[in-house]
Image (cartoon, rainbow, N blue to C red):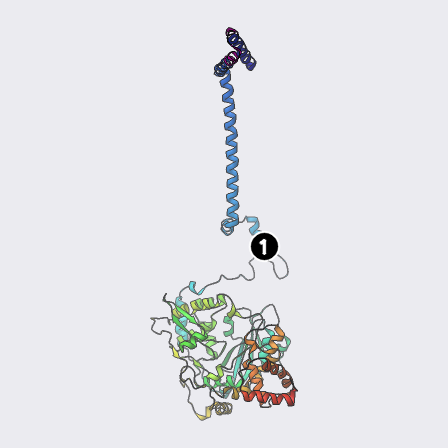
Amino acid sequence: MANLLQQRVVNDAVIAGVSSSSSLPSFQRNKRAAFVSKKLMQKTSNSPMSSNRGAQSAKKVSKWSLVKLVFLGTCLWILFFVFMIVHHHSWITTTTQETSFVRSVRNRSNLVTEEGQIPLSNEQPRSKKKKKILPRHMPPNTPQDDERLRQAKQTVLAPLTSPMDREKYTIRMNTWRRNEQLLTSINHHSSCEGVAQIQVIWSDTTEEPPQEILHHKSGKVIVERHEVNSLNERYHILSPITTLGILSLDDDVLRPCEAWDSGFFRWTKSPDSIVAYDYRSHEKTSSGEWKYLGLNATRYSNQYSVILLRAAFIHRDYMNLYMSHLPRNIFDVVASNFNCEDLAMSLFVTYLTDGMPHLLADLWATDSLVKIYSHSGGISGKTGHKLIRHECITDFSKALGLFEGDEHELPMFQLVHDSHSVLELGAPLQHRMTNSTAMIVSREDKLMASVQDFTWRNINDKIWKWQIPSIWEAMKSGLIQNTVPWEKRWGKHSSKSLRLTKEEYWMALALLHGALDQEQIQWMDQILKKIKETDTTMHKDVIAALRSQQKTSLGTV
């Protein structure tokens, strides 16, 4: 209604204005009419009714603007949270708490018993995984630890009084789900004259040992079942042992029986020492900590400070003292990390003997090592293995009072004394027993006569007859890396496999001396092809002899 009245007023005024100026030309009258109409519209817009309508319109516009701002702000917040979820998912999950329902379901699912039943809420799980303790976070010794160390240091080791202790030793073999490698190792080592017994440390509670091991044909094997899967268990003696000398051995290590005798007879002269086949060293870093050195760095420095227990002769009492008197902080670090049990024992014995050097087997014996191949690898190949050992050698030494600045700092010993000798290695023997002729058994006397003329030039020509019995089963089974059977079994090739391996070289020397049986001679055909196809470093006389054997025994290649 207001609009109609307003339009009517404007029309009347325009008509009146135009009629009053009818004497003007037509174009001027139209211009005047437009001017009058515009002025009247401006006046009528200022009326109270028009202003109310404008206010309502402005209010409506402001309301829509507010809705748009709220909508835009909501979208921005949604985009922000999406960004946080994508790029900071870990942060969001750690700050988000589970509901009590989810926690209860998860806890109950973890408490399923072997019978498939869920226990009551007040029952506890059968076994709870312990939190991993890194060496760097190892707590200090407790007063009880220090007291146990004092008592261990006062312990007197049992003397080697019986002939059995000077002639025989017991192998304690550590293993974990490598049954083929384990059986290969047992088959060889059970044939050694000096082995009284082989105790297999079986810590696998889910799988049974193979029947071939439980009832081994040699009659020397005992499977020792452990309820705890820890590297500390290799020192936990559960079965009776008839000898004081123990060869601590990994299941993938092969050496000739004569090489083990070399270390054993050295140990009988100083039974409170450890006689090892693997040695390592350490050095100080810029941060003041110690760094664990590998084999090549140790050889370069020509010094060693610790030994490894994967192949070492040790007194039985040291194993018992380790389990009962080693500080619990060191014990827990070994159990938590599956690492450093060898460093723990090496440093522990150094502490107990006031820094007396660990002894090493003859150089030819340490270099006679043959590793049994494992497709799954081992503990030392895991990520961070060496980093943990850096911390172990530092913190274990601090706990045992062997660190730099302590009264009995971990000593260093010269590794090689005569670069031309293959007999002397490591610290000199410190006789702790009377070195009389009566204490030299016939097997030792025979060994000493065999190795006295060993040199770097003739070492391979001398020991091949000892190596063939130790490597043959592993060789034909494809368990010696880079050999021809290994390539065929695993389908692997490398630059090293193009060259003749030391094991293949020993087989060639055995062929040269006519010491192989018919099965081994037939297998040698594979090596002859490898020699023919590759540039080998074998001696010309050996190649010539191989060709002559080829004509008589194997036929033309």
Q: Image quadrant for the N terminus? A: top right
Q: Which quadrant of the view contains residue 266?
A: bottom left
Residue 419 located within the stretch drawn in magenta: no
Could you tell me which quadrant the C terminus lies in? Answer: bottom right
The magenta span reads 19-33
Looking at the image, residue 19 lies above or below residue 406: above
Main SS category, magenta section: helix
Label 1 sits on residue? 108
Residue 381's place in the image compared with 9, above or below, is below
Residue at left 52%, top 38%?
A: 74
Q: Is residue 529 above or below residue 382?
A: below
Residue 338 at x, y = what percent?
50, 68
User: Eyeballing the image, is 53 above or below 246?
Assistant: above
**Magenta span includes 20:** yes
Q: Quadrant of residue 343?
A: bottom left
Nearer the observer, 249 or 487: 487
Q: Position of residue 246 (x, y in %)?
A: 50, 80
Horizontal placement of 444 versus 532: left or right? Answer: left
**As rendered, which of 470 and 300 lies closer to the eye?**
300
Q: Amino acid at mark 1?
A: Arg
Residue at image position (43%, 71%) is 292
Q: Locate residue 80, reporting x and y percent.
A: 50, 44
In the rendered structure, the answer to whether residue 36 lies left or right of residue 146 reads: right
Which residue is most to the right? Answer: 555
Report if residue 537 is visible in the image. yes
Q: Disc 1 on helix, strand or loop?
A: helix
Q: Position of residue 361 (x, y in %)?
A: 46, 83
